C-alpha cells in the first residue's frame, strides 16, 4: 500500500476507534448523551485548542498524537459527574488539580481502549502518560503533517478529538507549539 | 473475604480516589498510594500490604517493571493490574511478570471484586 494511503487509512481507523470509545465512555461512565458528532477527515490547516487540552502520543504500530480539547465548563462538569458516580469528596483547594486529573484519566481510558481495537498481531501500540495543557490557541499544521478532527457535542457542551500525524509534533516542548492568540 | 490492606499505584490522582472509594465499598482499605512505580518496592517493603493494584503506563518506572521488582523480593505478593490497556501483548507481559489479575478501566466494582478474589486464591 502506498505510504500516503496507509497513513490516511490508519488516521481514519484511529478516528473511528476514538469515536466509538469516546461515545462508550460518555454513556457508560458519565451517563452523558451524545447530541451529535462531526468528523473532519481531510486535513485541516489549523486546530483550535480550547481551554484545556489533554495530549497522548501513540508510538510503535501507530505514530500519531491525540489531543482532546475541552472548554472549562465541560471539564468541570466531567469532574462533577465522576465524583458523584463514585461518591468522591473533592476539597475546594484541590479542585483545579482534580479537574485536570479527571479529563486526563478520561482521555487515557478512551485511548487505551481505542488501542485495543486498533491492535495488530505482534505489533504493540505504546502510549505516553497524558499531558495537560491549560492554554487556548491555534495549532497551525506544519508541512507534511496531517490534522483530522472529531467534534462531539453533549448536553453539557462540546469537545474536540484531534488526531495529528506524525506524532513527533508533540514529542518535545509541546506547550510551546500552541500559539496563544485568543 | 476478610478486609484487605491495599497499596494502590497509579499516576492518576483521580484513579487513586476512585480506587479508594471502590475498595472501601468492597470492604477493603487503601493503606498507601504511589503516583509512580519508582517507590513501589520501598512502600511495599514498609507496609507489607495484602494486595497491590498497579497501573501500567506511569512515568519513570512502569507497572510491569514495578511488578517484577516487588515479586523479585516478595514472590508471594498479590498484584492486580488496573489499566486502560487491553492489548493482548501488554496483558501477556503483565501476566508473565507475575500479576495475578487484570482489570481494564473504566473501573467497575464487579470486575475489581472478581479479579481480587482470583488474586487472593491460594496456589495449592
Image: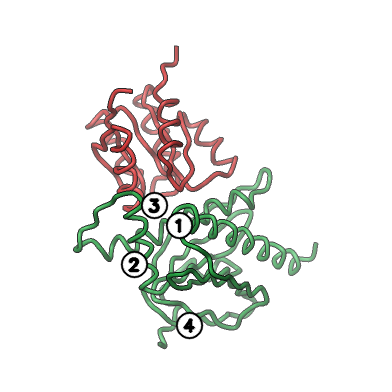
Chain colours: A green, B red
Are the residues at dot 3 and dot 1 in contact (C-beta closer than 8 Å)? no
The residue labelled by disc 1 is: A31
Is A37 or B50 nearer to us in this picture? A37
Q: Nearer the viewer, mark 2 or mark 3?
A: 2
Marks 3/1: CA–CA distance: 31 Å
Secondary-structure class at tag 1: loop
| Residue nearest the observer in this picture, A178 or B1 | B1
SS for callout 2: helix
Q: Chain of mark 1?
A: A
Which callout, 2 or 4, points at the residue further toward the start of the chain?
2
Q: Label 2, on which residue? A: A76
Measuring 44% from the left and 38% from the top, which residue is drawn there? Answer: B81
Visible residue check, residue B35:
no
Residue with the mark numbered 3: B59
Q: Is residue B93 left or right of residue B123?
A: right
Marked residue chain, label 4? A
Give the percent coordinates (x, y) of residue B117.
41, 26
- What residue did someone put label 4 on? A138
Amino acid at each position: 500500500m502506498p505510504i500516503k494511503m496507509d497513513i490516511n487509512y490508519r488516521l481514519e481507523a484511529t478516528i473511528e476507534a476514538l469515536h466509538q470509545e469516546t461515545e462508550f465512555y460518555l454513556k457508560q461512565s458519565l451517563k452523558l448523551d451524545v447530541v451529535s458528532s462531526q468528523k473532519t477527515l481531510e486535513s485541516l490547516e489549523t486546530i483550535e485548542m480550547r481551554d484545556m487540552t489533554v495530549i497522548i502520543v501513540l508510538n510503535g504500530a501507530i505514530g500519531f498524537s491525540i489531543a482532546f480539547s475541552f472548554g472549562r465548563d465541560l471539564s468541570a462538569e466531567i469532574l462533577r459527574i465522576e465524583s458523584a458516580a463514585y461518591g468522591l469528596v473533592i476539597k475546594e483547594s484541590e479542585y483545579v488539580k482534580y479537574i485536570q486529573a479527571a479529563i486526563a484519566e478520561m482521555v487515557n481510558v478512551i485511548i487505551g481502549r481505542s488501542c485495543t481495537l486498533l491492535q495488530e498481531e505482534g505489533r504493540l501500540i505504546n502510549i505516553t502518560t497524558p499531558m495537560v495543557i491549560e492554554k487556548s490557541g491555534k495549532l497551525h499544521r506544519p508541512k507534511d503533517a496531517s490534522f483530522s478532527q472529531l467534534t462531539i457535542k453533549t448536553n453539557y457542551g462540546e469537545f474536540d478529538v484531534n488526531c495529528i500525524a506524525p506524532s513527533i509534533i508533540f514529542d518535545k516542548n509541546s506547550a510551546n507549539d500552541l500559539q496563544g492568540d485568543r | 473475604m476478610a478486609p484487605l490492606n491495599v497499596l494502590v499505584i497509579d499516576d492518576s490522582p483521580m484513579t487513586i480516589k476512585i480506587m479508594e472509594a471502590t475498595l472501601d465499598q468492597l470492604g477493603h482499605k487503601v493503606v498507601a498510594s504511589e503516583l509512580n512505580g519508582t517507590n513501589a518496592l520501598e512502600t511495599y517493603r514498609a507496609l507489607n500490604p495484602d494486595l497491590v493494584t498497579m497501573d501500567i503506563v506511569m512515568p519513570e518506572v512502569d507497572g510491569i517493571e514495578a511488578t517484577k521488582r516487588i515479586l523479585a523480593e516478595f514472590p508471594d505478593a498479590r498484584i492486580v493490574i488496573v489499566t486502560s490497556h487491553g492489548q493482548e501483548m501488554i496483558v501477556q507481559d503483565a501476566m508473565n511478570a507475575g500479576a495475578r489479575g487484570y482489570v481494564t478501566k473504566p473501573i467497575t466494582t464487579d470486575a475489581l471484586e472478581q479479579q481480587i478474589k482470583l488474586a487472593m486464591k491460594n496456589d495449592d
